[in-house]
């Protein structure tokens, strides 16, 4: 029996009788932001007097940066700037989930506010209509940190039967992924698929296609919803790129990318040009693809069922390559390519920005160009 959190042991039926009480004309807006780790999410709720129709209807708010690894106690107040709004699948309509940027006391972006620069970069290539799809792998853990459903004093059978598996001995925690999927659909997150992964207790959901900056909005909100669903079930969702040492599958966030030119007739030529540019900026992308600048991915990208971190390769239908061109894309001579390097705990704003800088803005070298406000 896996240990579960105290919150999961509370009586949900008792809670439900309160959730069914009318709330009048008020709306609960849950403000969500990325903390100073670059990976953790925080949230708090504000009462609004009317249902917001657009993001402009939402007020700014403040919070304690010192309590979220973002500032010192001596200068703690920071600002939440609403940027994307979703329906709330936990409190239901008319309540909202609000994804926010974080600004410091001087109104400059917090160090982990990577959306700010990403938005500038996306605006520069808006006419190229860049589309992204991200395949988010995660691992379900008990509160004790052991993968959900694994034997207490040993390991499950070797990998092989678990990927897209069916049955109590193959799929660990399907209730959670089903609840997450439906909650994302209700919220308006562009979730487009889900499956059990190679390691037992490991799952994947896919988000996209999303154009430009919206990729980061939708993936971060999908992650928040997963954490919140897991809270109700009393388990933990981990995005660690290598949750279990040894010959167990790592966790990535494979990123699919295309432009309007790539998707049109003869687009394969533009795909191949982009891949050639990527081949010349390996270390830059390694740094951009996990929050620890490549250290997390070094544990995962070892060549065992994943690319090698310091070796660039590309191929059709090759899942051990750095860049995979799907077989259907090669046949149709147009479509998209998949970058298999981003780690499960990557910041989607950083990943999508890096792809745009290299593939569309033709940056060279290993340091990104600074783009200033005009």
Image (cartoon, helix red, strand yellow):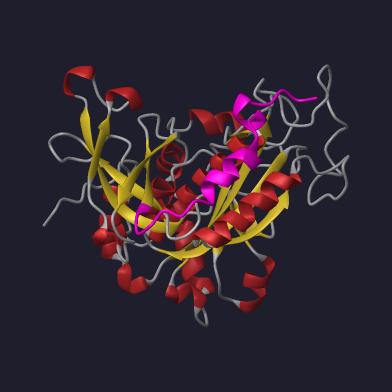
x and y, in percent, of residue 30 in the image: 39, 46
Q: Quadrant of the C terminus?
A: bottom left
Residue 208 in sight from this viewpoint: yes
Specify whether 101 is left or right of 223: left
Specify whether 76 is left or right of 288: left
Q: Is residue 180 above or below residue 35?
A: below
In magenta, the rendered stretch is 1-27
Specify whether 258 is left or right of 246: left
Query: Residue at 32% of width from left, 48% of height from top?
Result: 47
In the image, residue 45 lies in the stretch drawn in magenta: no
Residue 251 in sight from this viewpoint: no
Q: Quadrant of the N terminus?
A: top right
Specify whether 72 is left or right of 29: left
Q: Nearer the viewer, residue 248 or 91?
A: 91
Q: Nearer the viewer, residue 239 or 221?
A: 221
Query: Residue at 48% of width from left, 41% of height from top?
Result: 346
x and y, in percent, of residue 13 in the image: 65, 42
The answer to which quarter of the image holds residue 329 is bottom right
Query: Residue at 81% of width from left, 44% of height from top?
Result: 171
Query: Residue at 38% of width from left, 57% of height from top?
Result: 24
Q: Is residue 16 above or below residue 318?
A: above
x and y, in percent, of residue 224 in the image: 49, 44
Q: Is residue 59 above or below residue 110?
A: below
x and y, in percent, of residue 138 in the image: 62, 40
In the image, residue 13 lies in the stretch drawn in magenta: yes
Query: What is the residue that sits farthest to the bottom in this orientation?
Result: 265
């Amino acid at each position: 029996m896996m240990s579960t959190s105290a919150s999961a042991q509370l009586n949900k039926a008792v809670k439900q009788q309160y959730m069914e009480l009318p709330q009048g004309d008020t709306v609960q807006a849950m403000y969500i932001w990325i903390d100073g780790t670059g990976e953790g999410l925080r949230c708090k709720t504000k009462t609004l007097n009317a249902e917001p129709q657009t993001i402009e209807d939402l007020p700014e708010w403040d919070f304690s940066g010192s309590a979220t690894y973002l500032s010192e106690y001596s200068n703690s107040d920071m600002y939440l700037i609403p940027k994307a709004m979703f329906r709330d699948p936990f409190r239901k309509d008319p309540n909202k989930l609000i994804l926010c940027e974080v600004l410091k006391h001087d109104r400059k972006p917090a160090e982990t506010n990577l959306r700010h620069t990403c938005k500038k970069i996306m605006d520069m290539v808006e006419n190229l209509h860049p589309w992204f799809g991200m395949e988010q792998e995660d691992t379900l853990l008990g509160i004790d940190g052991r993968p959900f459903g694994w034997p207490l004093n040993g390991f499950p059978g070797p990998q092989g039967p678990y990927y897209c598996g069916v049955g109590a001995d193959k799929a660990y925690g399907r209730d959670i992924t089903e609840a997450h999927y439906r909650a994302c659909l209700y919220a308006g997150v562009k979730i487009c698929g889900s499956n059990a992964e190679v390691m037992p207790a490991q799952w994947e959901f896919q988000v996209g296609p999303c154009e430009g900056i919206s990729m980061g909005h939708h993936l971060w909100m999908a992650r928040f919803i997963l954490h919140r669903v897991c809270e109700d079930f009393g388990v933990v969702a981990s995005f660690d790129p290598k949750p279990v040492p040894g010959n167990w599958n790592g966790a990535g966030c494979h990123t699919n990318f295309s432009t309007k030119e790539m998707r049109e007739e003869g687009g394969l030529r533009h795909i191949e040009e982009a891949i050639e540019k990527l081949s010349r900026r390996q270390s830059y992308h390694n740094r951009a693809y996990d929050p620890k600048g490549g250290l997390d991915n070094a544990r995962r990208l070892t060549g065992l069922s994943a690319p090698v971190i310091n070796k660039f390769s590309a191929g059709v239908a090759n899942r051990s390559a750095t860049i995979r061109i799907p077989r259907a894309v090669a046949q149709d001579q147009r479509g998209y390519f998949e970058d298999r390097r981003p780690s499960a705990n990557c910041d989607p704003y950083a990943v999508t920005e890096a792809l745009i800088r290299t593939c569309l803005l033709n940056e060279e070298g290993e340091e990104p160009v600074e783009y200033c406000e005009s």
